[in-house]
Amino acid sequence: MMEPGGFLSFDLLRRRVMGILSPAAAADPGFWNSRLLPISVGVLGTTLGIAPLHCACLDRHGAGLLVAGNSGAGKSTLTAALAERGFAVVSDDWTYASRLNGTLVAHGLFAPVKLLPDAIRFFPELRDSTPSKTLNGEIAHEIDPSRLLRSQWKASSVPKWLFFLERASMPGCRFLPCPPSHTQQFFELNAEKLPAELPEAARTRSAIIQRLSSCKSWILRTGDDPIRTAAAIDAFLLEV
Amino acid sequence: MLSSWRCDVSALDFVRYEDPLDILLRFTPTPLRARFRIPAATLFVETNDFSLLPALPLETSSRRIPPASLNWKLVRDPDARGLLQNPVMQLTPQLTVVAMGVACLLAVDHERRELLCFLGPDVDPHTFQEFLVPLLCRLSTQSLENPPSESAPGLNEDRADA
């Protein structure tokens, strides 16, 4: 990620980041958007009252839709499919939640949406894109949904709905209501460990997760491709 | 070049630690612990690798630990592949951070009297003992002799600048 000789250090107790970057990296918006800011907010966010959540976030008319699930469940391709249906993209992989005047707000960092090479089956637009090595070592297309998909970015949204995406072997989409305890457990178990020296950060994060668990939540079991699944979500949200 | 100091890598007996919720290896178990003595202080060393116990005199006396003491946490990180590079430093009144490429990242928190060091598998015991241990001792001594001034911004400062 960093050029030789460059490095960042994070001082969580004093809430500071120090970095040594080359002029080229410092002037590169792509480096800031897809590397530096996500890492900095991910590492330091909890000390600033921001809870990094492993989920995607989309927005429709000011209402936020979070898509969570284990790695490999298909969050990113579903995010891209929903983006093509007109949802604005807040975030793809990591969403940063905070409380603003008592309201839970989900933020994104305009980090590119990552699609694995086989996603070209569903998004022919990818044929002009070249996959590259991403932050976690995967080879993937890193796309700007406002350029490649029929979508736009949105900086933040107020979460209203939450789907836990699960793959199913049978075709079709099933929406199973899930209790707040499921949401709380999922995000607590997927949260990065915090040192004992940061008790306030741990409390704040738990409070945010607890607040998040009051969103309407469903387990979405799908055996359909992402395009059909996105259409099913679209139709489902019109009814709830 | 620092990298020319490298010797053949001997078998290292550290245990790989993987926890997806501890990406930064902040909770890597360091069960090997010992007390050492340097002229300025007593060092409490903990590590996950026998070869990272420094070749320093052991502190064996049963007398009370003098107030000048420092904690070292030395973590062998099997994924930090590469040889030592020329050092790059970051300094604040509270922290000294030194990076020598991916293979070695160390930081001294002068307020908390802690030294944390991550070392890759290609940093062999000879390089560690002959080059890094003297450096760590020097940083520790400097930290104890020049503690952060009370007027310097520190842990209790107004955090509005975060």
Image (spheres, grey):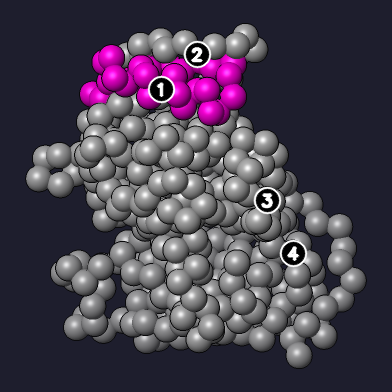
Tag shown at residue A233 = 1
Q: Mark 2 lies on which chain?
A: A
Q: Are marks 3 and 2 on the same chain?
A: yes
Locate the C terminus of chain A by quadrant.
top left
Label 3 to label 1, Cα distance in Å? Answer: 27 Å
Give, as a three-letter code, the residue at label 3.
Answer: Arg
Q: What stretch is highlighted in magenta?
A: A213-240
Disc 3 target residue: A127
Q: Are marks 1 and 2 in contact (CB under 8 Å)?
A: yes
The residue tagged with tag 2: helix, strand or loop? strand
Tag shown at residue B39 = none
Camera-side residue of A47 and A33: A33
Give, as a three-letter code, the residue at label 4.
Answer: Arg
Judge depth for marks 3 and 2 and give the one in front. 3
- Lower position in the chain sequence, tag 1 or tag 2: 2
Disc 2 target residue: A173
Q: Judge whether residue A217 is colored magenta.
A: yes
Q: Where is residue B144 in the image (x, y as percent from the top left)?
A: 41, 80
- Lower position in the chain sequence, tag 3 or tag 2: 3
Q: In this view, does B88 lie above or below A138?
A: below
Neighbor class of circle 4 (other Cα within 10 Å; few <14, some 14-19, many 20+) is some
Tag shown at residue B81 = 4
Q: Do the residues labelled 1 and 4 touch (CB within 8 Å)?
A: no
Q: How many marks are shown on the rendered structure?
A: 4
Q: Where is residue A24 in the image (x, y as percent from the top left)?
A: 53, 83
Q: Mark 1 lies on which chain?
A: A
Image quadrant assignment for residue A180:
top left
Q: Residue furthest right?
A: B8
Image quadrant assignment for residue B68:
bottom left
Q: Position of residue A219 (x, y in %)?
A: 43, 17
Q: In this view, does A207 lie above or below A35?
A: above
